[in-house]
Image (cartoon, rainbow, N blue to C red):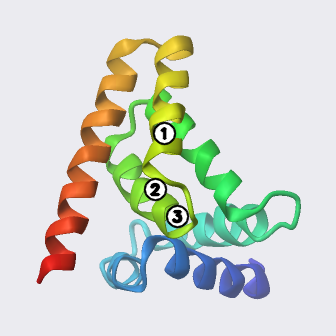
């Protein structure tokens, strides 16, 4: 295990997905899945998201397309919110889901649009409070 990659990954994950979500998921980890969470934080977030080759906005574009195409609604929801934090606009997100529809099918794109609208509504409601 690489503590430096883990710490870097944890910081990036907290910035992109939100500290509350990141901290809660770690607090809920147990002996069964704790090693998995550590691996994801170290490798995905620290060693991949932490690289200089792509900026966070570009990485968010990629994640939106992949998660939508793979039908991973829970992760897509998280990464839609993260993409907004990383500067992806709603119009750009629309283009991503249109691209998914062209190459992966309408059902995948429809889910992406539906989940995005739910996230947008939740964020608008939270902003009003």
The numbered mark at residue 36 is: 3
Q: Position of residue 27 (x, y in %)?
A: 34, 85
Q: CA distance from mark 2 to mark 3?
A: 19 Å
User: Tag 2, which secondary structure?
Assistant: helix
Q: CA distance from mark 3 to mark 1?
A: 19 Å
Which circle's residue, 2 or 3, is located before the other in the chain?
A: 3
Which circle's residue, 2 or 1, is located before the other in the chain?
A: 1
Residue sitting at x 48%, y 24%: 98
Q: Position of residue 68 (x, y in %)?
A: 44, 34
Q: Nearer the viewer, residue 33 or 99?
A: 99
User: Tag 1, which secondary structure?
Assistant: helix
The numbered mark at residue 67 is: 1
Q: Nearer the viewer, residue 98 or 27?
A: 98
Q: Is residue 75 above or below residue 107?
A: below
Residue sitting at x 39%, y 75%: 31
Crowdedness near tag 1: few (<14), some (14–19) or many (≥20) residues, C-alpha within 10 Å = some
Q: Position of residue 30 (x, y in %)?
A: 35, 76
Q: Is residue 18 above or below residue 89?
A: below
Q: Is residue 88 above or below residue 1?
A: above
Residue sitting at x 40%, y 62%: 81
Q: Is residue 124 above or below residue 21?
A: above
User: Tag 3, which secondary structure?
Assistant: helix
CB under 8 Å between callouts 2 and 1? yes
Which circle's residue, 3 or 1, is located before the other in the chain?
A: 3
Q: Position of residue 42 (x, y in %)?
A: 68, 72
Q: CA distance from mark 2 to mark 1?
A: 9 Å
Which residue ends up furthest to the right in the rendered image?
53
CB under 8 Å between callouts 3 and 1? no
The numbered mark at residue 79 is: 2
């Amino acid at each position: 295990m690489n503590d430096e990659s883990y710490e870097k990954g944890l910081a990036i994950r907290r910035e992109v997905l939100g500290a509350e979500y990141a901290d809660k998921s770690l607090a809920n980890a147990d002996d069964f899945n704790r090693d998995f969470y550590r691996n994801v934080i170290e490798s995905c977030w620290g060693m991949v998201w932490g690289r200089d080759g792509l900026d966070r906005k570009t990485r968010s574009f990629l994640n939106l397309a992949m998660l939508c195409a793979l039908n991973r609604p829970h992760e897509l929801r998280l990464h839609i919110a993260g993409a907004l934090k990383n500067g992806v606009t709603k119009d750009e997100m629309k283009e991503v889901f249109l691209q998914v529809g062209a190459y992966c099918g309408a059902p995948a794109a429809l889910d992406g649009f539906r989940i995005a609208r739910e996230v947008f509504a939740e964020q608008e409601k939270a902003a009003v409070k």
